[in-house]
Amino acid sequence: MHLVKKIEIIANSFELPKILDSLKKSGVHGHAVIRNVEGEGLRGGSEDLDMTMDDNVYIVAFCMPDEIKTVAENVRPLLNKFGGTCYISDVMEIRSVKCVASL
């Protein structure tokens, strides 16, 4: 087990390619994307009933603690353009030592 940073981003789907590119350039090479996210935050509610370019996406990725400053510096300008939010937290990663599926 070791400590890593968890990056959670909720943003407009229009910015998704730029955000993923920014994460990759920051040293983050793996991510998951959940599309058509809806919820309510400081600016009120957001419902994505029709699939459009205005839909929200939820991105989750992980990086080493020493990379997080670069990630934040690269992602912030993109979130400022169309709105969005980023949460960063400490989590423990447990990697499999011997994957049964690979035997």
Image (cartoon, rainbow, N blue to C red):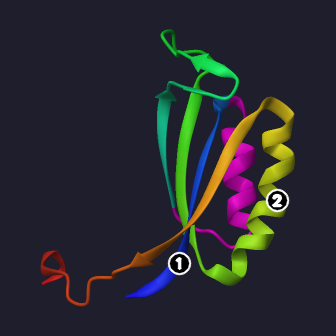
Relative to 28, say whether 1 is above or below: below
Disc sitting over residue 4 in the figure: 1
Query: Can residue 82 be seen in the rendering of this structure?
Result: yes
Query: Can residue 53 be seen in the rendering of this structure?
Result: no
User: Element type at marker 1?
Assistant: strand
Tell whether position 29 is magenta.
yes
Q: Residues within 10 Å of mark 1 (few under 14, many from 20)?
A: some
Tell me where residue 68 appears, x and y as whole percent.
71, 72
What is the C-alpha distance between the residues marked 2 and 1? 18 Å
Q: Residue placed farthest to the front in the image?
A: 42
Q: Which of 12 and 102 is in front in this view?
A: 12
Q: Residue placed farthest to the top in the image?
A: 50
Tell me where residue 56 appears, x and y as whole percent.
59, 28
Q: What stretch is highlighted in magenta?
A: 14-30
Taking the image as shown, residue 60 lies to the left or right of residue 69, namely left
Quarter of the picture containing the N terminus is bottom left
Residue 80 picture quarter = top right
Quarter of the picture containing the C terminus is bottom left
Q: What amino acid does circle 2 point to?
A: Asn
Q: What amino acid does circle 1 point to?
A: Val
Q: Which of marks 2 and 1 is nearer the N terminus?
A: 1
Residue under the point 82% across and 51% down: 76
Query: What secondary structure do most residues of the magenta stretch adopt?
Result: helix
Disc sitting over residue 74 in the figure: 2
Tell me where residue 17 appears, x and y as whole percent.
69, 43
Tell whether position 92 is magenta.
no
